[in-house]
Amino acid sequence: MKKWLSIVSALLVLSLASNVSAVAAEKSVTTTSLTSYGADYLTKTDGSFWVWGGNRSVPTQIHDLNEVQAYFNSQYVMKKDLSVWQWRTSAYSETVKVTPVQELDNLVDMFIAGNRTIALKGDGTILSATIQYSDGLKTSDFTLVSGVDNVAAIGGYYESGFHKGWTRYILLKKDGTVSTTHDDFKSFDTIQNLTDIIQIKNNLALKKDGSVWSWPVLDYYKNPEAPINLSATRFNGISNIKSLKGNQNSLLAIDGASQLWFWGATITGYSDGTIYHEQSPILLKGIKNVVDAYIVERTIVALTGEGNVYQTSIGSETIPADSKFTLLETEVSNIKKGARHIIMQKKDGSLWGWGVNKEAQLGYGDYEFSHDAPVPVQKPISISLNGESISLSNGVITRNGQNFVPLRSLFEKLGATITYKENITAAKTIDKQIMITRTATDKPALAISINSVTGATLVNNKSVNLPTLPFIVNGSMYLPLRFISEQLGASVEWLPQEERIAITMQ
């Protein structure tokens, strides 16, 4: 029982009914306040910074960060003044710690492989750090990498696979040449025959003239005497390429005619039986006017100039040139890719997610393993109490015309306390009761009891019907706050222009 009380006490979340319509509850409404977004974050015009994923099932504001301009690899943000800050959530609690990282000011890009992070600054220098843990928080100490400068882009790939290989780091220089390191930044070598390079991807380089060049993938585990110096040759079968996409195994390219090319691995089997089938470059004739494309799990996802997003599978031994693309979403402006999902911004400004969601990657408010159809990312709504912005462990969830909000930290300010108890029924099941009582002695006594299993609610031992039953997401309990707040004497106002719920308590 103590364990259950501790978990619920830490995760208790209450719901707040607002004036949002039922339609808005089912579909993501226009988000005009959005200034930027990624696969797991967004920023708003008021300078606020929001993230989702893991224990945050929906967009949740990180209160100690504002004026954020860019977000790098789940831990680092750069503000408009070009200062870089690391934010970390403790593994033992919901506590967020924000600290400045002065050596990373004017950060351009980050690349993470294993426990090493490579950072690129605007002046063309790079820094390296290994991930460490302290008090349940990830920490990284960055040091300047000597022997290389004027870097324009960073990348890398696993030379021999994920389990037995090592990471080959690739550095695109501002003069269009490409450097690499074979000894973990102790020395650097220039990859021969590469000039006028504008993009690097794995062991590929794209030239200004649209040609793609490649160099051998060396297995130093099987052949320690493999030559250190690398020499690139032109990659046959494709030309007039404008951008390279894809992952470690499967590649895409968009050419000057907005056509989509595929080569590399198709995939069959699962788990230990996964088989990769190599395929030469083919022009995918089933889609045209492509402006962006990604590999997501075993699917090609492509955005066209008309604003349509299409998908086709690479989960077979081969993918034919006439592979059929099916429509996934319309009215899309752009898309961003996560590790196993995508986030799409529609022309009305709203965000929608698709793909694997087991860690709440879609910001939808659930932990279903995946969603085959796009779902709306929950709208980033802030909370204030008597004008003071409130920090929440998890953001607002909108369901059935109501906003559900984690307001555990507000109860004392609202004049209430929370206790918990378990009752074993005659059927030998366990009912878990949440008890909300008013502490003010100058007001009438108030005791609200809510059964977290059935939703049965008592106010001063009298049964009442709740307009919306409690629900649980990832162990967190959500209760109807409008009803409770009115009982406590608080007033609630929805301010749509500010995307804010204002609670006033006298």
Image (cartoon, rainbow, N blue to C red):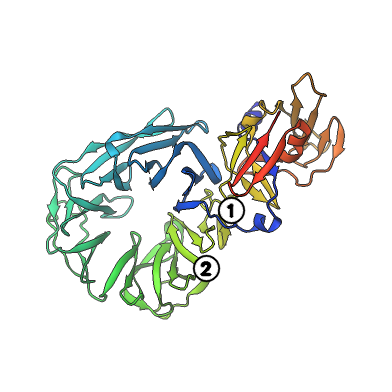
Picture disc at residue 331: 2
The image quadrant of residue 336 is bottom left
- Name the secondary structure under disc 2: loop
* x then y, percent, for residue 366: 60, 50
From the top left corner, tell me how far across and down residue 159 is, in percent: 25, 55
Mark 1 highlights which residue?
368
Residue 262 image position (x, y, % from top left): 35, 71
Who's the residue at 76% across and 32% down the image? 489
> In this rendering, is residue 411 above or below 300?
above
Where does the C terminus fall, quadrant-wise? Answer: top right
Toward the viewer: 121 or 211?
121
The answer to whether residue 352 of the structure is visible from this angle is: no
CB under 8 Å between discs 1 and 2: no
C-alpha gap between disc 1 and disc 2: 25 Å
Q: Is disc 1 surrounded by few (<14), some (14 to 19) or many (20+) residues within 10 Å?
A: few
Observer-nearest of 391 and 241: 391
Residue 120 falls left or right of residue 188:
right
Left/right of residue 385 with respect to residue 32 in the rendered view: right
- Name which residue type carries label 1: Glu
Say which residue appears at 26% left-offset and 76% top-offset: 237
Question: Which label sits on residue 272?
Answer: none
Q: Is residue 34 above or below residue 67?
A: below
Q: Secondary structure at mark 1?
A: loop
Residue 195, position as x, y percentages in the image: 14, 63
**Between 45 and 51, which is closer to the camera in this rendering?**
45
In the image, 48 versus 497, the foreground residue is 497
Residue 131 visible: yes
Query: Where, quadrant-wise, is the N terminus in this rendering?
Result: top right
Q: Nearer the viewer, mark 1 or mark 2?
A: 2
Depicted 166 relative to depicted 129: above or below: below
Q: Amino acid at mark 2?
A: Glu
